[in-house]
Amino acid sequence: MIKISLVGDIGAGKTYVSKLFMTPCFSADKVVARIYKNNRKCYIALKKKFPEFIKKFPIKKSELLNIIKNKTSNLKEVGVIVHPFVRKELKTFLSENNNKKIVVLDIPLYLENKMNKKDDIIIFLKTVKKEADKRLKKRKNFSNKLLNILRKSQLPLKQKIKKSKYILVNNYDAAIMKKRVKILKDKILNDRSSS
């Protein structure tokens, strides 16, 4: 099984491009949303750590955003509690899709949390920052303060490029991106079978 992970700046379109690979995709954001909605163990741990923010079950996204906005270091604290639940779900996803040629891992802090393995294919999704920022501003709950906190928690883009095997340019044109992803997917399969 080939594990592909897309990395890049916030708003580069990683989730959208992940879907274009037309293969099982592990979306950490969806998994985290499900954990906040259904996992009482996670709720209890977060409530214990942040009683002034977490009011009742299920956990609201707005409560978590307030935790992070309140103090930058809280992002790491939330991660320490939530990541073990995400890793458990990832393990399940990988074993369920063990027979697939390719799976895509859409995990925002993939490199930062040292989740990458030696054989993983890392693709850097390059985009025009101005275009990415324009799209980010359209998101619900957008805040410049939060964006800056999240950007600071990530590796510099140069480091992400260095750790990537391929660079894919996202120009936000659906038809072009479908073609680019198909070409890259074929190349990855070809490279892997010939090695």
Image (cartoon, helix red, strand yellow):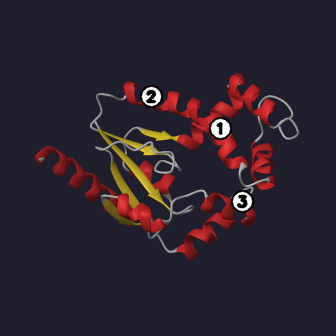
Query: Mark 1 or 3 closer to N-term?
Result: 1
Please name the residue that numbered disc 1 is placed on: 33
The percent position of residue 34, horizontal first and vertical second, equals: 64, 33
Count of marks overlaid on the render: 3
Residue type for callout 3? Leu
Out of 152 and 188, give the one closest to the viewer: 152
Q: Residues within 10 Å of mark 1 (few under 14, many from 20)?
A: some
Pointers 3 and 2 in contact (CB under 8 A)? no
The residue positioned 81% from the left and 53% from the top of the image is 70
In this picture, is 115 found above or below 168?
above
Please name the residue that numbered disc 3 is placed on: 146
Q: Is residue 178 visible?
A: no
Which disc, if any, is residue 91?
2
Pointers 1 and 2 in contact (CB under 8 A)? no
**Does dot 2 land on a helix, a strand or a loop?**
helix
Query: Mark 1 or 2 closer to N-term?
Result: 1
The percent position of residue 44, horizontal first and vertical second, equals: 76, 26
